[in-house]
Amino acid sequence: MEEIVRFGVSMEKNLLAGFDDLISRKGYTSRSEALRDLVRDHLVEEEWKVEKKEMIGTITIVYNHHTWGLSDTLIELQHHFHNLI
């Protein structure tokens, strides 16, 4: 585990109250834990915006296979957008 470094954070009272509410709703045990998660999430989000690299994900479609023509439409869409999927 990496060394933990303490630092101070200043913010408006209403912002801190909202943060404390979030901590309570999400079940965090401390402000530090919640802040670490927020920073990690933001760093990952920014990396995805900046980096031009391949990503892996899934697309899950739930549909009624008895609906006439729907399977064909889905296949057509997959072929049309194959470069993006």
Image: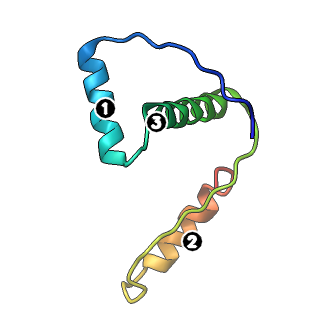
Residue 28's place in the image compared with 69, above or below, is above
Identify the residue position indicated by label 2 in the image: 75
Give left or right: position of 15 versus 29: left
User: Where 16 sits versus 22, above or below?
Assistant: above
Q: Kindly give the residue lying farthest to the bottom in the view shown.
A: 66
Q: Nearer the viewer, residue 56 or 82?
A: 56
Disc 3: which residue: 34
Residue 84: image location, x then y, percent:
64, 50
* Label 1, label 3: how far apart the Cα atoms are: 9 Å
- Location of residue 5 (image quadrant): top right
- At mark 3, the secondary structure is helix
> Residue 11: x percent and y percent?
36, 12
User: Which image quarter holds the N terminus?
Assistant: top right
For the residue marked with disc 1, what is the amino acid? Asp
Give the side of residue 37 with respect to residue 15, left or right: right
Observer-nearest of 30 and 82: 30
Could you tell me which quadrant the C terminus lies in? bottom right
Q: Are marks 1 and 3 in contact (CB under 8 Å)?
A: no
Which residue position holds label 1? 20
Q: With respect to residue 78, does 32 lie above or below?
A: above
- How packed is label 2: few (under 14 Cα within 10 Å), some, or many (20 or more)? few
